[in-house]
């Protein structure tokens, strides 16, 4: 290397300084590091380390970027891969990270800090506007941790940090147990509740769209349905379009979340007949409204043809449930009930996943199939047959 520069400080002590070529940044600009050591030997050792790590592809250049700054950059990067609604969900998930750890330099973030952050979030975190003492659910904290891990893993790929300090951090087992014990979790409808709801909405104007929700479609898929997507002659429904809400205020129309979400489903007989009647009813409403009618082309519209959004459909369903004295559940949770019914009635996993719009059948069963005691009656009957086939009990 070039002869290091000898520097004499005001107190008379001596330091040695040199400049090391550290490669190029992501924009192609040359990176040069200035290193200062007490002796020439230490200076040479540091320079050799940098050169060796560069050659091995493991060198991490010093950087003053904070965790908060990196998270903002990561969210912009993710825009290439995910929908606008997903970016909003990610941003909300990282609010607590920004507030509590955003000021920490990325390269100084330690595993203990991440672990302490997670522990504090479980015990003291609460939603905006939540009542004091209302803690975040463990599932929410795990979602936040998942996003943080993903962002830090990307920082490793970009060689901003050597390893992710969140890689091995988990929510403590005792916190999971406490959350499971103390938190009331709304259960999806039972088959009996679903059937009660179906009987109770037979005269409802939105009977057909609600039946679509009860055959496993997501609310955004129901509201995104157009009459051009439905073949009333063949009895098929094509899912290619969704209408979801951003912040529960703005409608966002887009294609399905994944390629697996695009699918053609055969219509069961009741939704098929209900859609035929709903189509005819809309024709009568259009004739009665005249020029006041908006021919939007969607299936789920009001009496004047204006498209109904997911919030309006949800609120309509809630009012109907309340009027029938049923437990209030999200229409999305009704999807869980429907897929569980298919699973316990012998529908093959590959068909179950395709119907739900998933790529992976194991994901469908893990996230959406919840076996209730009444679903296991057949198993109990099998045990009766087994026990009955053995020796008779002595009176």
Image: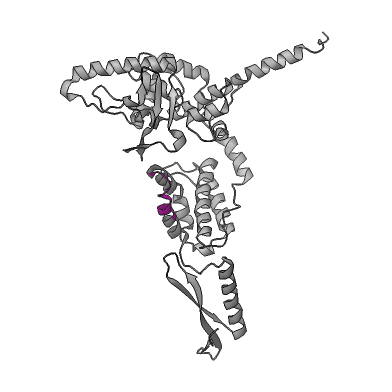
**In this view, which residue lies farthest toward the bottom?**
12
**Residue drawn at point x = 49 percent, y = 53 percent:** 151
**Residue drawn at point x = 41 percent, y = 49 percent:** 80
Position of residue 350 measured from the top left corner of the image (x, y, whole percent): 55, 29
**Residue drawn at point x = 59 percent, y = 48 percent:** 170
**In this view, which residue lies farthest toward the left?**
291
Q: In the figure, is residue 176 to the left or right of 135?
A: right
> Camera-side residue: 76 or 81?
81
Residue 360's image quarter? top right
Position of residue 356 measured from the top left corner of the image (x, y, whole percent): 48, 29
Which region of the structure is painted magenta?
74-83
**Residue drawn at point x = 60 percent, y = 74 percent:** 49
Residue 369 shows in the view: no
> Camera-side residue: 231 or 102?
231
> In the rendered image of this protein, does residue 370 appear above or below residue 207?
below
Position of residue 332 measured from the top left corner of the image (x, y, whole percent): 45, 30
> Camera-side residue: 182 or 222?
222
> In the rendered image of this protein, does residue 160 appear above or below residue 303?
below
């Amino acid at each position: 290397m070039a002869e290091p520069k000898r520097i004499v400080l005001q107190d008379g002590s001596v330091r040695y300084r040199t400049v090391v070529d550290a490669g190029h940044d992501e924009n192609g600009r040359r990176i040069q590091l200035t290193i200062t050591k007490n002796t020439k030997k230490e200076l040479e050792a540091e320079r050799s380390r940098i050169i060796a790590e560069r050659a091995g592809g493991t060198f991490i250049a010093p950087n003053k970027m904070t965790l908060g700054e990196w998270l903002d950059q990561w969210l912009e990067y993710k825009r290439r891969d995910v929908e606008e609604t997903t970016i909003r969900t990610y941003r909300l998930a990282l609010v607590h990270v920004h507030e509590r750890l955003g000021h920490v330099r990325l390269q100084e973030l330690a595993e203990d800090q991440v672990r302490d952050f997670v522990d504090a979030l479980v015990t003291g975190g609460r939603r905006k506007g939540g009542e004091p003492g209302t803690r975040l659910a463990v599932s929410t904290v795990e979602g936040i941790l998942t996003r943080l891990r993903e962002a830090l893993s990307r920082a490793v790929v970009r060689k901003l940090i050597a390893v992710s300090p969140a890689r091995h951090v988990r929510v403590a087992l005792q916190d999971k147990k406490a959350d499971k014990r103390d938190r009331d979790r709304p259960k999806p409808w039972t088959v009996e509740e679903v059937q009660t709801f179906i009987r109770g909405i037979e005269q409802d104007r939105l009977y057909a769209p609600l039946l679509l929700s009860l055959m496993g479609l997501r609310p955004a898929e129901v509201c995104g349905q157009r009459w051009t997507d439905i073949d009333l002659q063949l009895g098929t429904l094509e899912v290619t379009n969704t209408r979801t809400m951003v912040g529960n205020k703005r409608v966002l129309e887009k294609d399905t979340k994944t390629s697996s979400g695009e699918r053609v489903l055969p219509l069961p007989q009741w939704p098929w007949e209900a859609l035929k009647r709903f189509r005819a009813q809309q024709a009568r409403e259009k004739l009665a409204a005249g020029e006041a009618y908006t021919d939007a082309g969607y299936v789920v519209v009001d009496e004047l043809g204006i498209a109904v959004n997911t919030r309006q459909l949800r609120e309509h369903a809630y009012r109907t449930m309340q009027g029938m004295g049923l437990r209030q559940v999200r229409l999305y949770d009704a999807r869980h009930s429907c897929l569980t019914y298919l699973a316990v009635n012998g529908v093959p996993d590959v068909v179950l996943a395709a119907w739900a719009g998933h790529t992976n059948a194991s994901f469908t069963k893990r996230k959406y199939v919840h076996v209730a005691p009444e679903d296991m009656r057949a198993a109990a009957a099998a045990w009766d047959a087994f026990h009955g086939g053995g020796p008779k009990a002595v009176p």
